[in-house]
Image: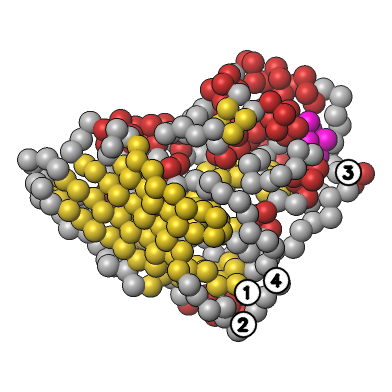
Amino acid sequence: MRDKRLHAIIILLLLWGALPSASAAKTTRYAFRSTYLFENRGAEPLALSDDDATIVIFENNEWQIVTIRNSTHGVSREYTDVDGNSLAVMDFPAEIPAGGTLFFSYEYVIDAGDSPRPSIDPQQSGGLSDIPEALLGEYCEETETFRRSEEMMALAGSLTSDESTVLGMVTRVLGWIVANVTYGNYEVPQYPDETLAQRRGDCDDQSILLISMLRALGIPALLQIGVVFSGSIEGDRTSWEGHLSVEQRGVGWHGWAMVYIPPWGWLPIDLTLTGSKDPLTIIAYSPEYESFVVTAYNVSDQRYIGDSRSSRERIIASDLYVSVSDIALEEAEPNNWIGTAYTISGVLAGAAFLVYLVFSRRHG
């Protein structure tokens, strides 16, 4: 993916707040309304294209079903990006006139259940040779987002020099980040070498650092983005020199790492939504196994950081002002189990989220 003006909206929607308690095995229904108001405060029209109206469709799987309702605009076509995420182009007008606005709103309905937690026993952990070869080329590459520095590779090597298992290597790197990197927000995501140098970053910054160090060691890893539901999430923020305003009530965006650790396979590792400092506890009790965390999309090869920074620069230099609102809605719990919901959902379209609604979005 190439140029994006609003790609980094996702960064400003990342979660601040406490976690709710674990849900029951039965499906829980969540819903939230997402609205976007785009204002052209200039004297010239802002032209729109199909690329400008591209959004990402939420992931549907065995433990979560996401559908959409009450949308102000329809979908003109769908396709898949470089990381396998499903994308949709919304049916938007050709331009926003001078002094005009574009309003877009819809509601997500999510039926989610807890996913099974693996029993993590360090004695059973495999080595690097137990990682499928097919994963090494795809999820161990250095990319624009997961770039490396000599300092980072040296640190990763020194931390894991006496470890023979993948789990042991992961816990060493994870433990160092937890002990040495504090939580802090920026207006755009940080490159891993920047987080390492500053010893500071939010959920996706810290996850990107972990992923980059693990990839350098030959351990497959990627970034996953989703939403978290909690009554404690409430905030209003304005950034990008006043061009972007964000409101959150009861739902917030969040990022975490997905790491391949044999013999258990892909495991979520959350560096910021946890009260533990123990690496094994963090891995074993990741909140992503619980129903209040809903997965949206994956980041592996795409230009997550570079595109986000380009978005900020272009928005600040333009006459475009954006207001974003995500508000959780009251919903009755469904009477079905998640397995039944998954079967029924095969004929339903997945819900899209407007984090990827961008002006000058490109894919490649």
Secondary element at image label 1: loop
Give the class, few, some or many, for how many residues have Cα within 10 Å of label 1's Cα (few <14, many ≥20).
many
The image quarter in which residue 148 lies = top right
| Residue range highlighted in magenta | 166-172
Q: Amino acid at mark 4?
A: Ala
Q: Amino acid at mark 2?
A: Asn
Question: What is the C-alpha distance between the residues marked 2 and 3?
Answer: 37 Å
Question: What is the C-alpha distance between the residues marked 2 and 4?
Answer: 13 Å
Disc nearest the viewer among 2 and 3:
2
Instruction: Give me the residue at 64% from left, 28% from top.
Output: 181
Q: Position of residue 143 (x, y in %)?
A: 53, 31
Disc nearest the viewer among 1 and 4:
4
Question: What is the C-alpha distance between the residues marked 1 and 3?
Answer: 32 Å
Quarter of the image where the C terminus is located: top left
Residue highlighted by disc 4: 24
Q: Is residue 142 magenta?
A: no
Residue highlighted by disc 3: 122
Give the class, few, some or many, for how many residues have Cα within 10 Å of label 2's Cα (few <14, many ≥20).
few
Residue highlighted by disc 1: 27
Q: Position of residue 312 (x, y in %)?
A: 33, 34
Does the rendering let one see residue 80? no
Sequence-wise, the earlier of marks 2 and 1 is: 1
Give the class, few, some or many, for how many residues have Cα within 10 Å of label 4's Cα (few <14, many ≥20).
few
136 in relation to 159, above or below: below
- Confirm or deny contact between disc 2 and disc 1 (CB under 8 A): yes
Sequence-wise, the earlier of marks 2 and 3 is: 3
Disc nearest the viewer among 2 and 4:
4
Instruction: Give me the residue at 71% from left, 44% from top.
Output: 275
Residue highlighted by disc 2: 336
Q: Would residue 48 appear left or right of 162 to someone viewing this image?
A: left
- In the displayed orientation, state which residue is furthest to the left: 43
